[in-house]
Image: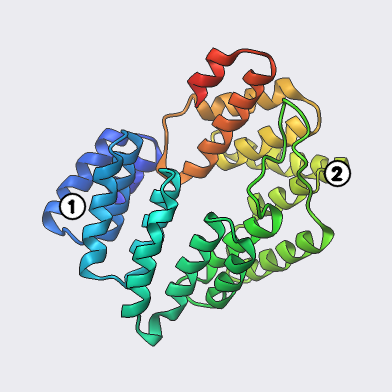
């Protein structure tokens, strides 16, 4: 039943996903996957308090369940209430078993980064980097921090964002990607994002070719569409960029690609602001 709920989540059928989650939670109230999907659907429907309460109840029973805590961190970040995570981390730390330290450092790393301390975030995530459970996500988040520690917009239609990344940071991101490749993970999008972060025409062109190949196999793959949209903006092809991003915004919101949807909406809203179409910008946001 979890697989069915996730399938409906992936294709954007939120009502069916919600229905399966509710049935699952009646059978198993502590089911983490169903809880995360259901809580995020509540957040999408502006039921923020209900979503947070769902997670809080789980963590009251098991404060050092770091899978649940990491999901709550993401939930609160998207709700603009990341500061509330501090109390949950304190409680988790006081209940944490030594065997579970990687999960604690993973969550502390996310919290540090999302509250404006990327250096501490990298230190914490690095502890979880080689863990069997949290290692992959720790590396992915470390790559994001190296490429964009302050979470700046890489491109803006309104004007220069001041974004830049150093060659050292690019190299560190590449090293982490090599580690992920050894786990048989498909790192194509991550590789393209590293190329895009350089903002160099040669690298952008290479990223565009790779993303074109990905989209030829799956024309509706949300992360590839968003990366291509950003790439085209940086290459000066505003019309092409908007076409790729429109494909994203026309899709029903899918929890699996929440961050990609957010990026697409921000880029589209930013473009509309640049051409003084403030009503359309507000619609995107």
Query: Callout 2: few (<14), some (14-19), or many (20+) C-alpha neighbours within 10 Å?
Result: few
Under circle 1, the secondary element is: helix
Count of numbered marks = 2
Gap in Å between the C-alphas at discs 1 and 2? 49 Å
What residue sits right under mark 2 in the picture?
A: 200
Q: What's the residue at 71%, 20% (across, down)?
A: 239
Based on the displayed image, in which of its 4 quarters is residue 228 positioned? top right
Q: Is residue 1 visible?
A: no
Residue 74 is situated, as x and y percent measured from the top left of the image, at: 43, 52
What residue sits right under mark 1 in the picture?
A: 24
Q: Nearer the viewer, residue 119 or 146?
A: 119
Horizontal arrangement in the rendering, residue 79 relative to residue 95 (left or right): right
Which residue in the rendered view is the most extreme toward the left? 26
Under circle 2, the secondary element is: loop
Based on the displayed image, in which of its 4 quarters is residue 177 positioned? bottom right
Residue 102: assigned label: none
In this rendering, is residue 284 above or below 61? above
Horizontal arrangement in the rendering, residue 102 relative to residue 14 (left or right): right
Q: Nearer the viewer, residue 75 or 221?
A: 75
Q: What's the residue at 51%, 44% (across, down)?
A: 259
Q: Is residue 64 visible?
A: yes
Q: What's the residue at 69%, 19% (across, down)?
A: 274
Query: Callout 1: few (<14), some (14-19), or many (20+) C-alpha neighbours within 10 Å?
Result: some
Q: Nearer the viewer, residue 141 or 203?
A: 141
Based on the displayed image, in which of its 4 quarters is residue 215 positioned? top right
Horizontal arrangement in the rendering, residue 157 relative to residue 87 (left or right): right
Foreground label between 1 and 2: 2
State yes or no: discs 1 and 2 in contact (Cβ < 8 Å).
Answer: no
Q: Please tell me which of labels 1 and 2 falls first in the chain.
A: 1
Residue 77 is situated, as x and y percent measured from the top left of the image, at: 45, 49
């Amino acid at each position: 039943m979890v697989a069915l709920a996730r399938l409906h989540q992936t294709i954007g059928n939120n009502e069916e996903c919600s229905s399966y989650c509710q049935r699952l939670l009646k059978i198993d109230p502590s089911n983490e996957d169903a809880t995360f999907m259901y809580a995020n659907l509540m957040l999408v429907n502006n039921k923020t308090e209900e979503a947070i309460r769902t997670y809080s109840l789980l963590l009251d029973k098991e404060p050092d369940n770091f899978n649940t805590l990491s999901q709550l961190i993401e939930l609160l970040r998207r709700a603009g209430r990341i500061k509330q995570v501090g109390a949950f981390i304190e409680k988790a730390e006081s209940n944490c078993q030594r065997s579970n330290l990687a999960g604690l450092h993973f969550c502390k790393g996310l919290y540090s980064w999302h509250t404006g301390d990327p250096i501490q975030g990298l230190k914490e995530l690095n502890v979880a980097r080689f863990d069997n459970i949290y290692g992959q996500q720790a590396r992915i988040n470390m790559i994001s921090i190296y490429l964009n520690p302050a979470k700046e917009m890489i491109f803006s239609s309104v004007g220069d964002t001041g974004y830049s990344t150093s060659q050292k940071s690019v190299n560190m991101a590449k090293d982490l990607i090599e580690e992920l490749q050894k786990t048989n993970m498909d790192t194509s999008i991550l590789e393209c994002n590293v190329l895009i972060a350089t903002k160099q025409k040669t690298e952008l062109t290479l990223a565009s070719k790779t993303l074109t190949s990905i989209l030829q196999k799956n024309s509706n793959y949300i992360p590839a569409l968003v990366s291509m949209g950003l790439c085209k903006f940086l290459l000066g092809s505003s019309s092409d960029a908007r076409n790729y991003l429109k494909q994203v915004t026309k899709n029903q919101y899918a929890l699996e690609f929440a961050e990609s949807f957010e990026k697409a909406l921000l880029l589209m809203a930013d473009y509309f602001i640049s051409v003084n179409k403030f009503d359309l910008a507000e619609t995107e946001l």
